[in-house]
Amino acid sequence: MNRRIFSHVVGVSLSLSLLAGFGSVRAADEAPDALIKRTSTEVLDAIKADKAIQSGDVSKVTALVDSKVMPHVNFTRMTAAAVGRNWRQATPEQQKRLQDEFKILLVRTYSGALIQVKDQTVSVKPLRAAPSDTEVQVRTEVLGRGDPVQLDYRMEKTATGWKIYDLNVLGIWLVETYRTQFAQEISAKGVDGLIAALAQRNQSNVTAKKS
């Protein structure tokens, strides 16, 4: 894997992992930057103390991400943005299948990279936002061995607290990256073709881990 792409995968997986300790009641009342700062320390400490994760237990990490991380991401908005204008043309059933397959792809891809977390810490930059803003960008840096890794979150305020709908690692926005890939697949084979391609990739990931 290309070093930049690997850093991107690790960075995004780390960013998702930082959400794992969010408590729904407390999170609803916290400012977005305070939420990121608090949970960053809590979750990083938990990962470093978990010998199963350190030994490469991907199933345990996958369960952690699926149960603790995804509830704090606006996944419908993230999927719709990644699919782009074609999202509105998709049927409700196609939209559901796209969300399901995209979620599996992200969970399995980034769960595998979480075992790379060693001695990292996170520095949260001052938040540039007004108290009335309902969408903000929280800027952070992941500090550890080597150069700092830029890690930014696009977040929106909801009735149940702040939720992430896009991530930027090393200057690369997650949604934009997938939008380019998905547009090419849809152009060639339509929405059903994209769904099939995602399902095939997810199945290949499962097969690879069993072998």
Image: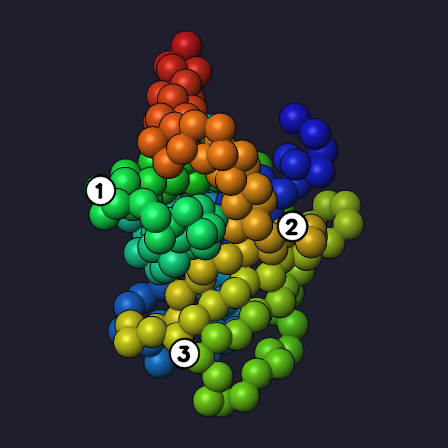
Residue extending furthest toward the left: 93
Disc 1 to disc 2: CB gap under 8 Å? no
Q: In which image quadrant can residue 51 be found?
A: top left
Q: Secondary structure at mark 1?
A: helix
Name the disc covering residue 30, or none: 3
Depth-wise, is mark 1 or mark 3 nearer the camera?
Answer: 1
Please say whether residue 96 is visible from this viewpoint: no
Q: CA distance from mark 3 to mark 2?
A: 27 Å
Among the 4 quarters of the image, the one containing residue 141? bottom right
Q: Position of residue 64 (x, y in %)?
A: 34, 44
Question: How many marks do you count on the picture?
Answer: 3
User: Any mark on residue 172, and which?
Assistant: 2
Which-is-in-front pick, marks 3 and 2? Answer: 2
* Front label number (1 vs 2): 1
Locate residue 58, reporting x and y percent: 41, 30
Task: From the viewer's side, name the closer residue of 111 and 81.
Answer: 81
Colouring style: rainbow
Dot 2 falls on a residue whose secondary structure is: strand
Callout 3: 10 Å neighbours few (<14), some, many (20+)?
A: some
| Rendered residue at 64%/35% (across/down) | 6
The answer to which of 18 and 78 lies nearer the viewer is: 78
Q: Quadrant of residue 111?
A: top left
Residue drawn 48% across and 75% down?
A: 135
Q: Amino acid at mark 3?
A: Glu
Give the Cα distance between marks 1 and 3: 35 Å
Residue under label 1, please give it: 93
First along the sequence among labels 1 and 2: 1
Identify which amino acid the numbered label 2 is placed on.
Answer: Ile
Q: Amino acid at mark 1?
A: Glu
**198, above or below 147, in the image:** above
Q: CA distance from mark 1 to mark 2?
A: 30 Å
Whichever of labels 1 and 3 marks the residue nearer the N terminus, that label is 3
